[in-house]
Amino acid sequence: MHLVFILISILFLGLIWGLLGGYLYRKPWLIAVLGILVGVIGSYMSSVFLEYEKIPELIRLFPDIMNGKDAVSVLISSISGSLFASAIILQAQNIHNRDVADANKEIELARDLFELFKKNDNHLKKTAKNISTEEFWVQYNIIRAQEFRAITKILNAEEKRNKLQP
């Protein structure tokens, strides 16, 4: 019985290790489902050991059957809990990476917007001879306000990104 338990445990751990080494290692919800599956299988194995305890011939042949039940219960509980913890941590990492990527996009968009306003400023300087002084100052103030808003967006986005990074 001990040999069967050891073989089942090694096979089960090998299966989990193989699954986590490939497709599942970046899918938190699949890891959580695998944790539930491991918990259900562990509950079933523990209930099987409970049924075996009721058979006097098995208790006589395998006096340590209670230890087997406890070992299975502890092992399966720890595996299931570890899978849930891994899924939670992986989900948190995915959310963090997505937030950092969003902050970087926001910075890039704000910088592009600032460059556009700088081009408008250069264009205004080139065409200043063709417009009235009053018109020039109105457009100049509009462009400066847009540049100021773009710089503010850049600074806010960089602050947001810096808060996200350790």
Image: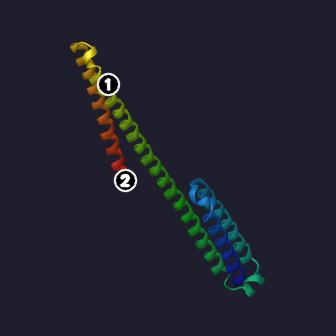
Quadrant location, the C terminus: bottom left
Determine whether the residue tagged by mark 2 lies in a helix, strand or loop: loop
Q: Is residue 134 above or below residue 52?
A: above
Three-letter code, disc 1: His
> In x, y percent, where is residue 90?
51, 57
Three-letter code, disc 2: Gln
Which residue is rendered at x = 33% and y = 39% of the image? 154
Determine whether the residue tagged by mark 1 lies in a helix, strand or loop: helix
Which residue is rendered at x = 61% and y = 77% of the image? 71
- Residue density around tag 2, few if under 14, some if 14–19, many if 20 or more, within 10 Å: few
Q: Choose the circle earlier in sequence order: 2 or 1.
A: 1
Q: Nearer the viewer, residue 70 or 1?
A: 1
Quadrant location, the N terminus: bottom right
Would residue 45 appear left or right of 133 to someone viewing this image?
A: right
Q: Nearer the viewer, residue 54 or 67?
A: 67
Q: Which residue is mark 2?
A: 165
Q: Which residue is mark 1?
A: 123
Would residue 148 appear left or right of 74 to someone viewing this image?
A: left
- Residue density around tag 1, few if under 14, some if 14–19, many if 20 or more, within 10 Å: few
> In x, y percent, where is residue 100?
42, 48
Q: Is residue 77 above or below residue 3?
A: above
> In x, y percent, where is residue 61?
75, 87
> In x, y percent, where is residue 109?
40, 37
Q: Quadrant of residue 68?
A: bottom right
Farthest right residue in view: 57
Q: Is residue 16 above or below residue 155?
A: below
Viewer-nearest of discs 2 and 1: 1
Which residue is rendered at x = 66% and y = 66% of the image? 43
